[in-house]
Image (cartoon, rainbow, N blue to C red):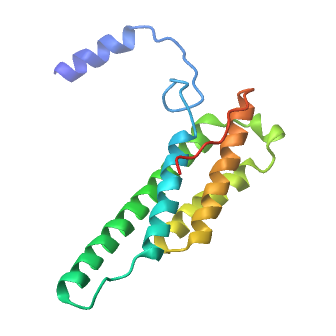
Amino acid sequence: MLFSTLSRILKKLPAKKVHAHCDGPCGVYDPASARVSAEAVLSMTKKLLALSPEGNDPASLAAYNNTFSRFVAIKEEQAQETKKELLILWTDYFKPEHLSAYPDLHDTFWKAAKLCSACKVNIDQSKAEQLMESVEKIHNMFWKSKGRNDSWVTAS
């Protein structure tokens, strides 16, 4: 009853036509969040490769396994977060008209997303470094598309 009454009222109200290039017309995009997440992937990968048990006793092995598991969980979570942030830029910010300026835009994002997946399932420093390089390329394309030349700065 209430639903049908509200539906009738809403149908009679005029609705303005709106346009947005994304799901929410906020206009706030920045590849920095992808950079921070990708940097965490690289950091965790380096830490995992450097990690080794301090002894063979049960306490040392338990401490090693705990730290190893935590580093892997962080690496995988941050790789997924990097992918999410990149996909938002790719699908919500960049428009068809950007393709003329960046003909490799789709290939760049696709390869970066694939690197995120590779970093999740492997402990491979070269893949993590390639991910950082891809995010830097996307950073440069993004800021150039806005008519700016913001510097690439990393935390480490």
Looking at the picture, tell me which residue is in the foreground, 129 or 31.
Answer: 129
The residue sitting at the bottom extreme is: 56
Identify whether 84 is placed above or below 15: below
Q: Which of 95 and 74 is in front in this view?
A: 74
Q: Position of residue 46 (x, y in %)?
A: 49, 68
Q: Which corner quadrant of the image does residue 8 belong to? A: top left
The x, y position of residue 79, in whole percent, is 48, 59
Question: Splitting the image into 4 quarters, where does residue 13 fall?
Answer: top left
Of residue 53 and residue 149, the one placed in the foreground of this image is 53
Left or right? Give the position of 5 relative to 13.
left
Residue at position x 26%, y 73% in the image: 66
Quarter of the N terminus within the rendering? top left
Identify the residue at image location x=72%, y=40%: 141
Which residue is at a point 65% across and 63% down the rendered structure image?
A: 130
Count of numbered labels shown in the rendering: 0
Q: Position of residue 90 (x, y in %)?
A: 62, 44
Q: In this view, does 103 lie above or below 68?
A: above
Residue at image position (22%, 80%) is 62
**In the rendered image, the vertical position of residue 156 relative to residue 47, given as above or below:** above
**Residue 104 horizontal side relative to residue 94, left or right:** right
Q: Is residue 81 above or below residue 130?
A: above
